[in-house]
Amino acid sequence: MEWLSYLPALSRGALITAGITLSAIAIGAVAAFAAGIARVEGGRVLSLVALCYTELFRGTSLLVQLFWFYYALPLVGISFEPVATGILVLSLHVGAYGSEIVRGALQSVSVQQHEAARALNFGRTQTLIHISLPQALVEMMPAFGNLAIETLKLSSLVSLISIADLTFRAQSIRNLTLDSAGVYSLTLVGYFAMSLVLMLVMRLIERLVRRGAAFPRAAHS
């Protein structure tokens, strides 16, 4: 079948897509926790900075952000390689949306838990590490799983800044062969397969987090 001849190029593009997506999720998770914790536990200045970052990247188009970082920043002497730009912008996007997940989960921890921590003479950092985060993490995982899948789908936009990801290679092959049905069917299957694997990994992580959260309660009971 002629379709099979497309697989090597599409597979190379899929590897780039997977690398960009996983890097963005990992870096974005760090940004999400930093901004989310700053919103809840930081002082006035840190909370304001985190709020500005969150609203800026949630309130503007990801495509425009990509173009701004790739085409506008070099005009003032700051430039990144295309892949670095894609990872950076996707990471900031994940961090902005993820920070709201973190903030909401932390604020869902009951007041009684904080009162119990104060009764045990816990400081704010101890309360965050030993009381708030373990409980909030369980609540965050489903939303983070959805965000991870969304990041994979949004990664197709990096093809517009000349990154040879799966979408870019599919478009290139389609322009050469004019076989829209074959090329885009394989591309569709490729994204679905990566989404399925990512979903299974996130569910495994969620299961491990829930088990880890349940173990201390069992140990203390």
Image (cartoon, rainbow, N blue to C red):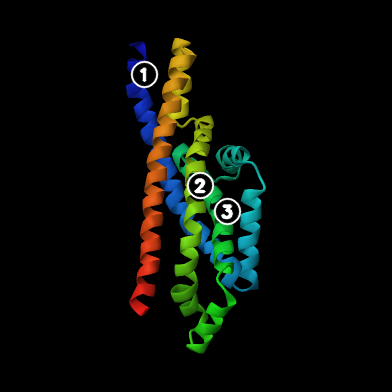
Label 2 packing within 10 angstroms: few (<14), some (14-19), many (20+): few
Amino acid beneath label 2:
Asn
Amino acid residing under circle 3: Ala
Residue shown at 60% from the left, 45% from the top: 76
In terms of depth relative to the viewer, which is nearer, 206 or 22?
A: 206
Q: Point out residue 69 in the picture as x, y percentages from the top left corner.
A: 57, 42
Secondary structure category for the residue under label 1:
helix
Residues at marks 3 and 2, CA–CA distance in whole angstroms: 14 Å
Q: Is residue 24 above or below residue 47?
A: above
Residue visible at 42% across and 52% down?
A: 26
- Residue designated by label 3: 96
95 or 116, nearer to the observer = 116
Residue beneath label 1, please?
6
Q: Is residue 209 above or below residue 159?
A: below
In the picture, measured across the screen, residue 101 lies left or right of residue 1, that is right
User: Do labels 1 and 3 touch, CB within 8 Å?
Assistant: no
Q: Position of residue 98 (x, y in %)?
A: 54, 55
Q: Earlier in the sequence, mark 2 or mark 1?
A: 1
Q: Helix, strand or loop at disc 3?
A: helix
In which quarter of the view is residue 37 placed? Answer: bottom right
Q: Residues within 10 Å of mark 1 (few under 14, many from 20)?
A: some
Residue 95 in percent (x, y) is at 53, 54
CA gap, disc 1 and disc 3? 36 Å
Q: Amino acid at mark 1?
A: Tyr
For mark 2, what is the residue?
146
Which of the two labelled residues, at mark 1 and mark 3, occupies the earlier sequence position? 1
Give the spatial CA distance, label 2 vs label 1. 30 Å
Q: Of tags 2 and 1, which is closer to the observer?
A: 2
Which image quarter: residue 46? bottom right
Indicate whether 168 appears above or below 102: above
Q: In the image, is 59 to the left or to the right of 96?
A: right
